[in-house]
């Protein structure tokens, strides 16, 4: 199949494929679909899950125009057709058409939202469809139709439609003026009520391209709810849902819940994204490391100290098996909910002088900046893989950060009593081990074109926006 050739058409993403056909006295043979060679020739990495064939007994049989909610690869397995395609996607190309004759030596890749139709030119013609989603009645609700006779599309059918063979359903399809354009696949955010979920909601464009589901709307640990989700409508899923109660994860009940949410449920989500060719964005943690190194790159191996870190490491490995994935590893997240910074601010204002550890080092990750970095990866189509993402600047201890919170709020940073982890934990029970160094190397995310803001500048902006006087 070395002679395969891919040709662009006037419709973005609609590709005409020229296939070698080997003929002899018996007939002909072709490789109708060969993923590795076709991708190398310029076709998208198309992963079909179903093959449909329509057999058309008479010349002049005309079908369409249907835009299904998936990608497809069409061609003939006998006979020939006049194929016609109309862009029904929202945008400046809406209504643009392309047509050509397909024999055994041609096929067409049809992206989601482009309507497909054909008219047979010979009796006993077989038309093949490879599609990326399983057909179902639920999926049919996502179809968009166009009338074969629409004058705007300007399709010149070789056999006039009044003499062609059409179904009653195809005759009843709307004209272009009455067709609602097909919108792009959305980005779904799970865990929408959490700190990161809310930051993503604030950063996302208000054009309907994002959908947000909180746990009350979709509980990842409920397999039935996940099965009911129509993944064909999403180009990416950002999983901001997780079990994050680090200390409770060390208890028998917490351990079960952490593994159920961070591993078992995530595995089901990863499998669904793989099956539907959906990009999965997953949030990882510095807790996958033991903190014995000064800093960690994306290539460093896992060495978690506690149950929470173990479940996050296991989840990262599951997500890495999804062909299109981003594992976004972060640390010390600060958003609009309860967090270390908000706690220190409350203590400063209420006259409490806290003791804070000075031997755990890292960088803050403000949810707004974390959200911006995630959206950047998706927007620019960065290479899939793992990316460290925290705020920038010099690493600091929790004690240094606490002192800075006090200072920025006009309180004496000397009220902070520095202590080490061993002394802080003396006499306490039920506390999970923490890594002493949570510093994540940011070279890779910077190479992808995103510059994380400096952590203390971000801290200043965060506190200023939330001060009582603002």
Image (cartoon, rainbow, N blue to C red):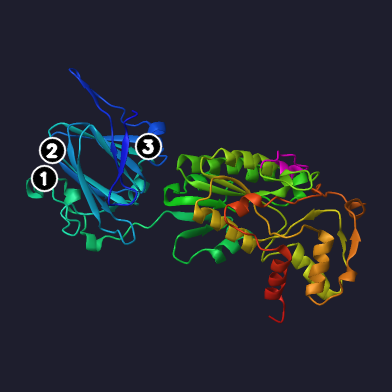
Q: In this view, does 121 lie to the left or right of 318?
A: left
Q: What is the magenta range?
A: 299-310
Residue 461: say if magenta: no
Q: Is mark 2 on a helix, strand or loop?
A: loop
* Disc 2 crowd, CA 10 A, few/some/many (<14, 14-19, 20+): many
**Alpha carbon separation for disc pair 3 and 2:** 29 Å
The label on residue 158 is 1
Q: Do the residues labelled 3 and 2 touch (CB within 8 Å)?
A: no
Indicate the position of residue 216 as horizontal and vertical percent values: 57, 57
Indicate the position of residue 221 as horizontal and vertical percent values: 59, 46
Report the quarter where the N terminus lies: top left
The label on residue 41 is 3
Considering only order in the chain, which callout, 2 or 3, is on the residue closer to the N terminus? 3
Indicate the position of residue 399 as horizontal and vertical percent values: 84, 61
At a point 71% along the width and 68% down the height, the residue shown is 457
Tell me, yes or no, if residue 216 can be seen here: no
Q: What residue is shown with label 2?
A: 121
Residue 308: say if magenta: yes
* Disc 1 crowd, CA 10 A, few/some/many (<14, 14-19, 20+): few
Q: Is residue 371 left or right of residue 90?
A: right
């Amino acid at each position: 199949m070395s002679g395969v050739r891919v040709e662009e058409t006037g419709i973005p993403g609609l590709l005409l494929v020229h296939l070698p056909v080997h003929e002899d006295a018996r007939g002909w043979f072709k490789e109708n679909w060969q993923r590795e060679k076709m991708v190398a020739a310029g076709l998208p990495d198309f992963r079909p899950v179903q093959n449909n064939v329509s057999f058309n007994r008479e010349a002049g049989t005309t079908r369409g125009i249907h835009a299904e909610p998936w990608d497809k690869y069409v061609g003939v397995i006998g006979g020939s057709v006049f194929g016609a395609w109309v862009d029904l996607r929202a945008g400046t190309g809406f209504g643009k058409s392309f047509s050509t004759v397909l024999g055994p030596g041609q096929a067409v890749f049809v992206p989601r939202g482009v309507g497909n139709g054909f008219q047979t030119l010979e009796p006993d013609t077989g038309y093949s469809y490879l599609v990326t989603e399983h057909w179902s009645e639920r999926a049919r609700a996502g179809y968009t139709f166009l009338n074969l006779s629409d004058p705007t599309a300007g399709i010149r059918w070789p056999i006039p439609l009044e003499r062609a063979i059409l179904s009653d359903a195809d005759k009843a399809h709307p004209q272009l003026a009455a067709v609602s354009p097909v919108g792009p696949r959305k980005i779904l955010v799970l865990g929408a009520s959490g700190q990161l979920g809310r930051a993503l909601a604030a950063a996302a464009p208000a054009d309907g391209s994002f959908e947000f589901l909180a746990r009350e709307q979709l509980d990842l640990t409920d397999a039935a709810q996940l099965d009911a989700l129509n993944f064909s409508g999403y180009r990416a899923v950002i999983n901001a849902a997780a079990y994050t109660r680090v200390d409770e994860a060390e208890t028998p009940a917490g351990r079960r819940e952490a593994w159920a949410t961070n591993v078992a449920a995530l595995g089901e989500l990863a499998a669904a994204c793989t099956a539907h060719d959906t990009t999965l964005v997953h949030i990882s943690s510095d807790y996958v490391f033991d903190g014995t190194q000064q800093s960690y790159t994306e290539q460093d191996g896992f060495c978690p100290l506690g149950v929470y870190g173990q479940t996050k490491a296991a989840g990262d490995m599951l997500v890495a098996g999804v062909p299109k994935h981003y594992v976004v590893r972060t640390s010390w997240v600060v958003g609009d909910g309860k967090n270390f910074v908000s706690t220190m601010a409350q203590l400063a204002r209420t006259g409490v002088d806290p003791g804070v550890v000075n031997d755990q080092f890292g960088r803050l990750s403000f949810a707004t900046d974390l959200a911006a970095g995630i959206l950047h990866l998706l927007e620019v189509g960065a290479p899939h893989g793992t990316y460290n993402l925290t705020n920038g600047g010099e690493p600091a201890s929790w004690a240094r950060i606490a002192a800075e919170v006090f200072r920025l709020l006009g309180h004496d940073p000397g009220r902070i009593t520095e202590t080490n982890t061993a002394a802080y934990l003396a006499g306490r029970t039920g506390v999970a081990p923490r890594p002493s160094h949570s510093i994540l190397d940011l070279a890779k995310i910077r190479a992808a074109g995103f510059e994380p803001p400096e952590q203390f500048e971000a801290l200043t902006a965060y506190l200023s926006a939330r001060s009582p006087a603002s």
